[in-house]
Amino acid sequence: MTAAASRHAYQMWWRALNSAEWTPGHELLVHVNNGENLVLDELSWSSADGALSAVGFSPDMASCYGHRRTTNGDVVEVRGELRSQPEDAQGTGDTRGYEFDTEVEDTTGWQPSEQLRLLIDDGADTPLLWTAWRDRTGISCSVSLRSASPTGNADITGMVTHVWASAEYRDAGEVAANLIEGTPSKWFAPHDRASLEFQFPHPIAADRYVLTSANDAPDRDPAAWILRGSVDGNLWRVLDTRTHQSFTDRHESRTYPITAPGAYACYRLDIVGNNGSPHLQLETVRFLAAAGGFTGYRHRTGHAPIPYRGACAAPEAPDTPMEPLPEELPSRHTRRLSRFPGTKVRVRSGDSPSAPSAGDDLIAGGHRLRVGESLRRQSLTSLNDAFTLKHFGFDDLILFRNYDRKPLWWSSSFSPGDWRQKRRGTGVSDVTLQPDGDLVAYDEDGVPLRSTGTAGCGVAMLEVRDDGDVVLLDSDGEIVWHTDTATTDVQLPSFTVARGDRLLVGQSLAEQSLTSPNGEYVLVHDHQHGGTFLYGPQGQITSWFYLVPAMFPDRFGTRLTLEEDGLFLRWSKDEGEGVDLRGVRKAWDSLTTPRFPFHPKQVVVRDSGDLEMLDADGEVMWRNGYKRNHAEFTKSSNQRQAKTSLKRAARRPAVPAGAPQLPDTPNVPVIRTDFSDHTAWERVKTGISWVTPDEFEANVTYVDDPAFAGLTATDLLESGPDRATHALLLVVDETTIRSPEHPILIVDLGSEPDPANDWPGEPAGRSFRALPHTIQEIENNLSIANMDWEDFADGVDDDGVRREHMLYGRVEDLTIDQATE
């Protein structure tokens, strides 16, 4: 038998166990050739649908017999008879076949071996995953096919670096990024047509794609679409067209083949119709790749097995021309972007960006950003700690000199000197170094705002240098673009900058960030807002944040440190003259006490969003604001909460006979006890409902019931407040209504004793007054025990009224619109 005549076609039959009847099955095509005259004894294989098969051959390979476990788990017998003489298999002659250039490993390393041609087609609709065989010479081989992804998995969706949508519903979190997360969340668009683009770090050949229907409303499912591929994002080739499609169930996944795959860096799904709704939605979009190689072994009888591997070329794209998008389709590249301030040094069109070598510093918070990576409220710091490039929520990028926090360069038209006055702006979702080498800032809707204009210039990475220059480099290390901020006057800061996902003893965050290993959670000490914030997926704020109190001297000049003396998050002003004011200007610490002594070694941002402090043995001693001996320690979470849920008492007190019962409320109750002026009541509600520029708002429920008319704070405490759920009551009484400033009475619901931790408890009834626009930060912080009662009560004016918002100042510093929007 020659190498060119080794393809066999068998008519197959199968029968169930303990049955005498054989049922005709699908034809089996077999072709295994490594340049020798192979005659197979045995063959086994599995496919992506989960089916497993194994057969043995007669000496002349004219028949076979074996068994199969089907996709649904049933076990059946199989047999086959050769339909005709072996056919010419030069190049396999079938799209399901593979040709691999192979290598084997010996004591000197990897050595070239014979080409392997492989075809096993049993009629399955899914590709081959694994196969093993033994020939008559006693040589056995086993190979597991792998794709071009780093893990070898056929699902290459995890390689997508950016998802763009022409429309999405950001307010509900139903954004395009959800499509590649593999969770029950979804993408929603308020239109019956929309476009999606999926960017890969380099061209890769997908041969299938999978769409999964969302959780509800079948009429929103896509029914017609066109899939396109592009190398540069400008010219496109149609890969697949579908019409009259439907899903039979919710969360159903359907796979669609790409008949002529090719290597593309960007895939685009243009949805041109649905099943009748004015809206669109999908749960996930996934891309699958064919085998790009294999890993396995060869084994000769009587010898040790040797490593065996192979690779095959990516499928060539069809000869059909690539064209610009039709004019009626939305494009993320149609608008001309404004430019980042900086200098393009040279232009090298046609160069392909290269990834940095494995040894480069590419940790989160390091000094480099590689192609395909983004910054979202994150920072990069030079190796000498002297300069930090930071992404702000609506100020794009800003370069700081860490010695004195002076901004040296910023990418937007808004000056950092006006930070404290800025209240609004187009939110910048992220800044991404695109695969084409362009550094692009995108807004919250994924629309590009500005760029460096370096697409096609061979950019491989961004680097923050020790001299203060921010540069884009090609694969040879040559500068393509830079900010022109290099200086010979480099002064080092008095602290060491933390990097990666943890803060070690002796390290600080000033304008820098820490990022969880999965990239979803970012801890930032923020000059702009005078505090420390933990952001979660899509840049949303979590329940953990700390604002430096307004009475703290220069809260915008602070830094976050982990001290050797056991104090955790301590803010201290940096003094250029080296004066140490830590003991004087401490804003807050981890409450390490003689009763709970330990010596922290590091603070870590976890993939779960938890913020944890560890001792020298790696034991977690503090989590999300709670010490290890606190009842909330094991239950704490930094997931964003829709309502308050902190327990303050074991049970609700009984209500005296004749007294009105306070209703159960999901959020902190605002109780109206004066009904003399409805307009004033509405003004109070408007002030309480103020949403900050960072989208914080008070979690309250309004109780507008005349049954509570004229009641005092003492009366309300006897009316059964839900101390098991809420930390405080808000009372709108006669003083609130009649005063032009409408100061609201804040009443503490107290806490129960904790003998195990020597805590005597706090009786209910403490109170102070605060203006409506300050309720947001008071409620937010006291409800989750992020701050203490004294942090707010001690900041009242001489008349007992708190007028200052720690972040946004006094009410007179806000415009009427800002205070009442």
Image (tube, rainbow, N blue to C red):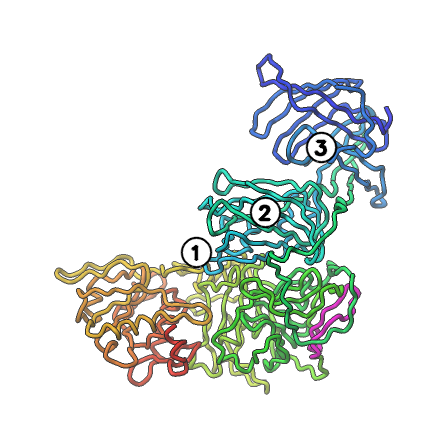
Q: Quadrant of the C terminus?
A: bottom left
10 Å neighbourhood of mark 3: few (<14), some, or many (≥20)?
Answer: many
Query: x%, y% of residue 276?
Result: 47, 46
Whole-Å distance between the Cαs marked 3 and 1? 48 Å
Span colored in magenta: 465-485
> Regarding mark 2 in the picture, which secondary structure is present there?
strand
Residue at mark 1: 634
Please report the residue visible at 29 percent of the width from the left and 57 percent of the height from the top: 650
Give the residue at the far left of this rendering: 658
For the residues labelled 3 and 1, say whether their Cβ atoms are less than 8 Å apart.
no
Residue 385 among those drawn in magenta = no
Give the residue at the far bottom of this rendering: 577
> Regarding mark 1 in the picture, which secondary structure is present there?
loop
Q: Nearer the viewer, residue 396 or 196?
A: 196
Query: x%, y% of residue 595?
Result: 41, 67
Residue 479 among those drawn in magenta = yes
Whole-Å distance between the Cαs marked 2 and 1? 48 Å
Residue at mark 3: 131
Residue at mark 2: 225
